[in-house]
Every structure is written in C-alpha cells, then in structure tokens.
C-alpha cells in the first residue's frame, strides 16, 4: 500500500530534550516536506527536500533540522525543543515539487507536546 | 504570502450548497484543494492549473481565476461526509505549497 509513515504518532516530552520524528514513504517520491499545523494558522511548511542531500527552508524553519540521506526517509529533528513547538506535525511527499499536477500525500501526523 | 480563505467557518444542513474562497496577494501557478477530517491527515481533492479551468469531482468542483489570483471550491447538495476543514494550497512558484488557514465546514442532518 502506498503510504507516508510517521513515528511516533504522539509524544510528550520536556524542554531541551532532543527528539526526532521519522518520516518514510514507499512511493519513490523525490519531493518531501514537513508542515506544522496550529489552530487558526493552517499548515505551515517547515522544511522541504527536492531530492537526496537537497533540503531547503520553508516558512517556519527556526528550531528545526532535517536530513535526507536516503530517498525514502526525511526525519525532522528538534535539537532543543521548546513549548512553542508544541503542535501537530505532518510529513508529505510527491513525485516532484508541487507544480502542475502533483498532489501531496500526507502522513497521519505526529502530535508533539513539549512541557 | 499565506492566502486568505473565506469564510473561516460555515454550517449547513444536508443538501445545501457551499462556496469556499481562496485569495492570494501573489501570482499563482496552480491551486490545490485538500480536505481534513478531525484528527486525520489532509486528503487531496483536486488541482487547478493556470488557464481558468474548472474541475469537478462528483458534487465538488472548483474554479481558478489566475488574473484575480483567486480560486473557489463549490460543494453542491452537501452530504454529511463533506464535513471537515478545507484547505487551499497555492503554488507561488517557489517549489512549495503555501496553505490558507482553512475553512471549517459542518454539515448537519
């Protein structure tokens, strides 16, 4: 089954404790992206990747890191999480950047609470 | 620049029609529409490309006016299953989608 898999689905942690949210897709997509969703603000892009070893900042990259060492994986790293990073996070992928006829496929989301 | 969706929320009775608008201050190459059920991932509905085309998906259709930098989503004879939050995602030519803040649609029996 074609899917984008995120782990964990839920995480409660404390300020300053490094964490990684994994994202994996099995559709051989080149483009992958991380979003955070907050009430009233919609989906805001954190980072995106055009291909292996090619990443770039989205609209809200502060406090986050990413890597793309393999085509299928795109982990999101919070090296020193803070309470303002409490949010619902989505990973998404598509064959190419979202231009023309390229829908984004979303994972099921990761709800992070940072105390 | 984040596009602006209107209305922010709408409540309908089953069978009524709804229009959700998405307006951008920047030129658009395409507009994507997604629906998200509470607690779930956004699900793709359709993409509108430059050219002012209108697309349909059963009783859900959309239009894109590139000159006005606007897109509208039309839901006709709404069903209970249409409830959710609708997002437009705009391609502003920067290798990424910029999403609106969402429109919450509630369909009551």
Image (tube, coloured by chain):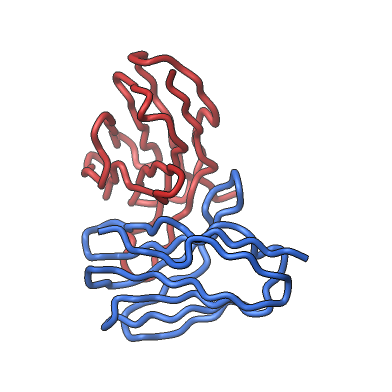
Chain colours: A red, B blue
The residue sitting at 33% across, 27% down in the picture is: A77
**In which quadrant will I find the C terminus of chain A?**
top left
Judging depth in this view, the residue of A102 and B43 nearest the camera is B43
Outermost residue on the right side: it is: B109
Q: How many marks?
A: 0
Percent x, y of residue B16: 67, 77
Seen in the picture, residue A44 relative to B71 is either above or below; the reply is above
In x, y percent, where is residue B1? 25, 59
Splitting the image into 4 quarters, where does residue A90 fall?
top left
Q: Please state the horizontal and vertical placement of residue A75, each as a whole percent of the image.
A: 37, 32
Q: From the viewer's perspective, tell me whether residue A9 is left or right of residue B5.
A: right
User: Is B52 situated left or right of A56 in this image?
Assistant: right
Q: Is residue A14 left or right of residue A69?
A: right
Frontmost residue, B82 versus A99 = B82
**Please, is residue B96 above or below residue B28 in the view?**
above
Residue that appears at 41% across and 66% down? B32
Q: Is residue A88 above or below residue A77?
A: below
Q: What residue appears at the point 60 percent right and 53 percent down from the top-left corner?
A: B37
Q: Position of residue A51 (x, y in %)?
A: 27, 47
Q: Is residue B45 left or right of residue B48?
A: right
Report the front residue among B106 and B92: B106
């Amino acid at each position: 089954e074609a899917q984008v898999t995120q782990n964990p689905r839920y995480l409660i942690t404390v300020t300053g404790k490094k964490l990684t949210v994994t994202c994996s897709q099995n559709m051989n997509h080149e483009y992958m992206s991380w979003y955070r969703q907050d009430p009233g603000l919609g989906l805001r892009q954190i980072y995106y990747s055009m291909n292996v070893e090619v990443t770039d900042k989205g609209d809200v990259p502060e406090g986050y890191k990413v890597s793309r060492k393999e085509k299928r994986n795109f982990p999101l790293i919070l090296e020193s999480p803070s309470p303002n990073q409490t949010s619902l996070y989505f990973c998404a992928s598509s064959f190419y950047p979202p231009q023309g006829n390229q829908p984004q496929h979303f994972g099921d989301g990761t709800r992070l609470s940072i105390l | 620049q984040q596009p602006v969706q209107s209305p922010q929320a709408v409540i309908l009775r089953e069978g009524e029609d709804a229009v959700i608008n998405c307006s951008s201050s920047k030129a658009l190459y395409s507009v994507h529409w997604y629906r998200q059920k509470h607690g779930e991932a956004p699900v793709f509905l359709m993409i509108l490309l430059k050219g002012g085309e209108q697309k349909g998906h059963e009783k859900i259709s959309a239009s894109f006016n590139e000159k006005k930098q606007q897109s509208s989503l039309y839901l006709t004879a709404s069903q209970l299953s249409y409830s959710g939050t609708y997002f437009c995602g705009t391609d502003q030519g920067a290798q990424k989608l910029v999403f609106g803040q969402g429109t919450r649609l509630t369909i009551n029996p």
